[in-house]
Amino acid sequence: MNPPPGPMRIVHVIQDILPQSGGPPAVVIDLSRQQAEEGDDVTILCPTRTDTPDIKALLEVRLKGASRRPKVIGPEGGRGGSQFVRHALERAQPDVVHLHGVFCPALSAAATWCDSRKIRYVCSTHGILHPSALAMKSLKKRIFFRVFPRILRGPRWLITLNAEEAEHARLRFNPNSCIVENGVNVGIFAAATAEEFLNAFPAFRGRPYALFIGRLHPIKGIDRLIAAYGKAVEMGLREDLLIVGPEEGAARDIADAIREAGVPGRVHVLPPIYGSAKASAIAGCSMFVHRPRYEGFGVAVVEAMAAGRPVVTTEKCHLDRAFGAGALRPAGDTDLEFASAMMEASSDARAGNSIGRRGAAWVHENLDWPKISARTRDLYRSA
């Protein structure tokens, strides 16, 4: 059944909206906000709790100033599971359902409910169908696909983040695979200053720093980034390196990499920061650096671009169009090549500022939320 013309009743279903879950919760909240402000009746539905203090704080930051807000629904205490999702969808009577993620039985239950009611639905993969992502815990994922095949074969559109993922998903799972990149709250990052971050961490006032923000997970390649940073320090790099994010299994690798690179006093691992504090940390950095093993779409990377900061990363970040526009500083994926790119960004302020300006312009032109919302709406309505 096609959505009606005009405003729609949209339900986004995601496993959780915890701040430490990285990009997907932020993307869902921001997209929902944009759709609500455009006049749609929007609900974010989770099979897990949505009333914890950290989630409330995240919602307040990301929805601050919104003229209209999405509803946020989760079970009251504990886990709601698939039955909770089905009942909530029945009450909401949506025109379209937007699933976020794959490996969650409650999302598969939502897909089955949509099929039984002939409700149109789409699924955003958030990068997890790229071959590099599927290779991690591959046996468990293969079992999931056999038990819950509907989650990938049923959606009218399977929304991916980059060309490699889209092609793989098209051939293996669903011919209706497409690309819609994540959006960015451009104004927040363009207007941020370093003061909030420096007031919270005064030790870095007057000390230039390169910055990484993200989950401290092995797939982010932080140990590889530190190895390259060590080479850059040997070349004379003046910046310290700040690593900011929630721990997700990479702490030992990071500690080992700092020791092996010989930079214990130059690399600083800080707790996760969100909202305006995150924007402030980005505003104060001399460069944003990311050397992932795989990245579907680096939300913090494009936030740094929106702030006009020069970004040094590799092709594994999969921001293909941004690379083509000269909006990033491309780096080779060896220690020496990445270190050389960092040195260039540090020593040539004019070139770094030029990259920052191109990055900000590219993000504003391509990734602000009204444009992403329009692309998504076209998918909702497409036959």
Image (tube, rainbow, N blue to C red):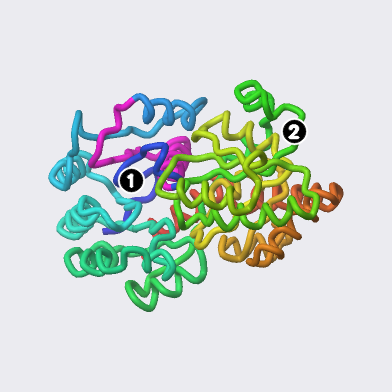
Asked if residue 237 lies left or right of residue 295, the reply is right
Which of the 4 quarters of the picture holds residue 8? top left
Residue 256, above or below 138: above
Q: Which mark is residue 337?
A: none
Asked if residue 40 lies left or right of residue 195, the reply is left
The C terminus - image quarter:
bottom left
What residue did someone put label 1 on? 12
Q: Position of residue 126 (x, y in %)?
A: 42, 56
Which amino acid does the dot numbered 1 rest on?
Answer: His
Residues 169 and 90: in front is 169
Asked if residue 185 lies left or right of residue 232, the reply is left
Which amino acid does the dot numbered 2 rest on?
Answer: Arg
Query: Which numbered disc, 1 or 2, marks the residue that appears first in the sequence?
Result: 1
Q: Residue at x 45, y 40 (%)?
A: 246
Residue 228, above or below 267: below
Give the magenta-colored segment's residue range: 24-52
What residue did someone put label 2 on? 207
Q: Residue at x 56, y 52 (%)?
A: 257
Q: Is residue 373 magenta?
A: no
Provide the secondary structure element on which disc 2 rests: loop
Residue 126, above or below 194: below
Q: Residue at x 84, y 47 (%)?
A: 349
